[in-house]
Amino acid sequence: MGSFLEGKKLQYAVIGSGSWATALVKLLSTTQDKLYWFVRDDRNIDFIKQYGRNRSYLRSAVLNLDKIVMSDDINEVVEAADVLVFCIPSSYFLSQIKALSTSLDDKYIVSAIKGFVSKDNLTIAEFFHNLYHIPFENIAIVSGPTHAEEVAMEKYSYITISSKYHKVAEQISEAFKCHYVKVIIGTDIYGVEYSAAMKNVYAVAVGLCHTLGYGDNFISVLVTGAYREMIHFIQQSHPDRDRIPTRSAYLGDLLVTCYSQFSRNRTFGGMIGKGYSVVSAQTEMNMVAEGYYATKSIYEIAKRENIELPIVNAMYGILYEEKNPEYTLRQLMDMLQ
């Protein structure tokens, strides 16, 4: 880890106030003496201070206000902390950090975002490295297999912490360990980031298939094909002979997102299968389905790199080109053998 972090008590901050951010705030306030929290809406801050719960997300999760310092000023929060855990939906990321003027030179970046940003479809690690010149030794990724709801309910869970530098992942992992969370450490940041985004695409596909009446037999083949497709994409787009895949972040996160009742991406896919438009499904859910945005990013990256991804292509056709789902899925069937 960077020398500026060695030998000091690290101050953590969470940037974002959605479901996953709220679950991480509850977790980190268990392990830290003080936690800074950027909450964009000052009305939500007032609600949390009065009731000890997030007004909009995971309202059943009780937060330890004695340890949490909230602000609607992102610069105030960033300046106070050493380790910044970014947990903003990827579609809102650029708009929310545009107010950021505080230097990140002496900060450590931890991404809990499962998607891409900018017109170049950068991962969060790539974004901070390329645009803010943050060295990779100061970047880590937080991933699953986890659902925010179960972490907030203190269900026994595993979180993956990945950094190019094992020592970095190891030190950051200490902040996420508690009596209901185990941490898996890895160095495969590209694989973990890409798989975290891609599994949402496949969960949308599963929700769509389920609603259209495809049974467990077909869906099991679809998920198996999705796993193969994910591995193929990661190996082709970021070849690394020394990569040791973190299977819990690849396969585990894929399974929990495709099959869980809490999966907003599966729910979103189910609504598309019922005939909802993308806009109407997003409006009714009142939550961000990252799989919709990730579909476009992965499709464009794969097209640029000449990587064939039949499931992603099918979902892009349905979500962005308004192709008939039934016809598109029938075409996909022959490619899953």
Image (cartoon, rainbow, N blue to C red):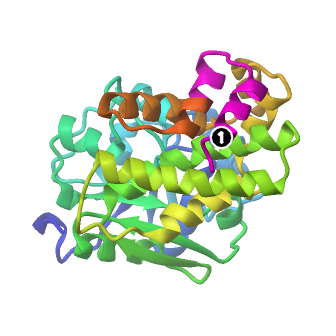
User: Quadrant location of residue 297?
Assistant: top left
Residue situated in front as seen by the camera: 336 or 10: 336
State whether residue 104 appears in this view: yes
Task: Let me know if residue 66 is in the magenta part.
Answer: no
Give above or below for 329 relative to 229: above
> For this view, does 65 lie left or right of residue 233?
right
Picture coordinates of residue 229 (x, y %)?
Answer: 49, 49
Residue type highlighted by circle 1? Asp
User: Quadrant location of residue 239?
Assistant: bottom left
State whether residue 112 appears in this view: no
Q: Quadrant of the N terminus?
A: bottom left
Q: Which residue is pictured at 80% across the width and 22% down the height?
A: 276
Q: Which residue is pictured at 71% across the width and 41% down the height?
A: 56
Q: Which range is magenta? A: 315-337
Picture coordinates of residue 145 (x, y %)?
Answer: 57, 64
> For this view, does 172 lie left or right of residue 27?
left
Task: Let me know if residue 324 is in the magenta part.
Answer: yes
Give above or below for 39 relative to 94: below
> For this view, does 127 lie left or right of residue 136?
right
Pointer 1: residues within 10 angstroms few (<14), some, or many (20+)? few
Q: Which residue is pictured at 23% across the width and 69% down the height?
A: 242
Give above or below for 223 relative to 64: above
User: Quadrant location of residue 36?
Assistant: bottom left
Picture coordinates of residue 93 (x, y %)?
Answer: 43, 33
Local SS, label 1: loop
Magenta span: predominant SS is helix
Residue carrying label 1: 334
Picture coordinates of residue 225 (x, y %)?
Answer: 59, 52
Q: Which residue is pictured at 48% across the width and 70% down the height?
A: 247
Extreme residue in the bottom direction: 179
Residue situated in front as seen by the camera: 184 or 315: 315
Residue situated in front as seen by the camera: 83 or 116: 116
